[in-house]
Image: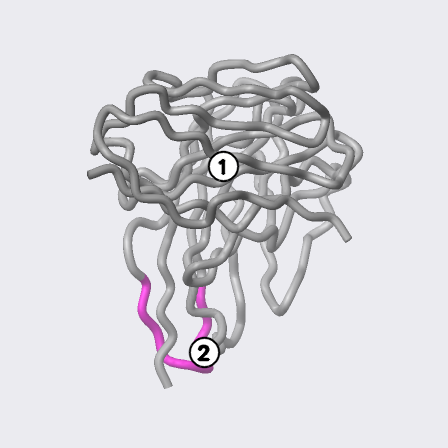
Amino acid sequence: EAAVTQSPRNKVAVTGGKVTLSCNQTNNHNNMYWYRQDTGHGLRLIHYSYGAGSTEKGDIPDGYKASRPSQENFSLILELATPSQTSVYFCASGDRGNNQAPLFGEGTRLSVL
Amino acid sequence: GDSVTQTEGLVTLTEGLPVMLNCTYQSTYSPFLFWYVQHLNEAPKLLLKSFTDNKRPEHQGFHATLHKSSSSFHLQKSSAQLSDSALYYCALSDRNNYAQGLTFGLGTRVSVFP
């Protein structure tokens, strides 16, 4: 069964600390995405990837980096976390052969204090 | 750039009554349109997507019709159920740049009461 798994599911970080959010997909999809969800803003794209080794900036990339070491894994990195990055983060994977409907993970709730 | 505008905020209704959520879009190219549903503390899940052959997609009693002339993809259900209480997102995908992800609207929260 198609799946996107995120870890951790919940994270509390301190301002200025480094945070890494991980995402694994078993769907053999080429494309992966990181979104954040905030009330009043919907889902906004942070970074995306076309495949292993590729990372591209989305609509709100400032303060975030991404890493795609393999087809299956896509990480979101906050080098210097700030309270404004408190949010729920969703990873998704998709492919043209998947009828163009990305599949989302369960989300990571991040609080930066 | 691409954009999606949805019915804003909260929609409350009584079980058994019809529901319609508006979605209009702007896109340079003829896009694919989607509706996602997100229940509390869950992932967004695909509810409906537009077809290339103008068929009307239906799922779980919901349907939506893509009207290119008015750039709309409104979501409808004839009789709301308590389990339909959720957050609904309309989204589009550029046919020529699918890999760059979906553009989402701000979401519409639906609360269905007995």
Classify the position of the C terminus of chain A by image quarter: top left
* Residue at x 68%, y 34% (from the top left corner): A94
* Residue B26 in picture, x, y percent from top left: 46, 27
Q: Chain of mark 2?
A: B
* Mark 1 residue crowding within 10 angstroms, few (<14) / some (14–19) / many (20+): few
Between B89 and B72, the one lying in front of the other is B89
Tell me which segment is drawn in magenta.
B11-19
**Which secondary structure, mark 1?**
loop
Q: Is residue A29 left or right of residue A109?
A: right
Q: Chain of mark 1?
A: B
Q: Which residue is mark 2?
A: B82
Q: Is residue A105 visible?
A: yes
* Residue A109 in picture, x, y percent from top left: 38, 47
Q: Is residue A98 above or below residue B96?
A: below
- Residue lying furthest bottom: B114
Colour mode? Answer: one colour
Q: Are marks 2 and 1 in contact (CB under 8 Å)?
A: no
* Residue A97 in picture, x, y percent from top left: 80, 33
Q: Is residue A87 above or below residue B39?
A: above
Dots 2 and 1 on the same chain: yes
Q: Quadrant of residue A72?
A: top right
* Residue A73 in picture, x, y percent from top left: 64, 30
* Residue at x 53%, y 28% (from the top left corner): A75
Callout 2, which amino acid? Leu
Between A95 and A107, the one lying in front of the other is A107
Q: Which residue is mark 1?
A: B70
Camera-side mark, 2 or 1: 2
Q: Is residue B21 above or below residue A85?
A: below
**Which secondary structure, mark 2?**
helix
* Residue at x 57%, y 53% (from the top left corner): B45
* Residue at x 53%, y 18% (from the top left corner): B28
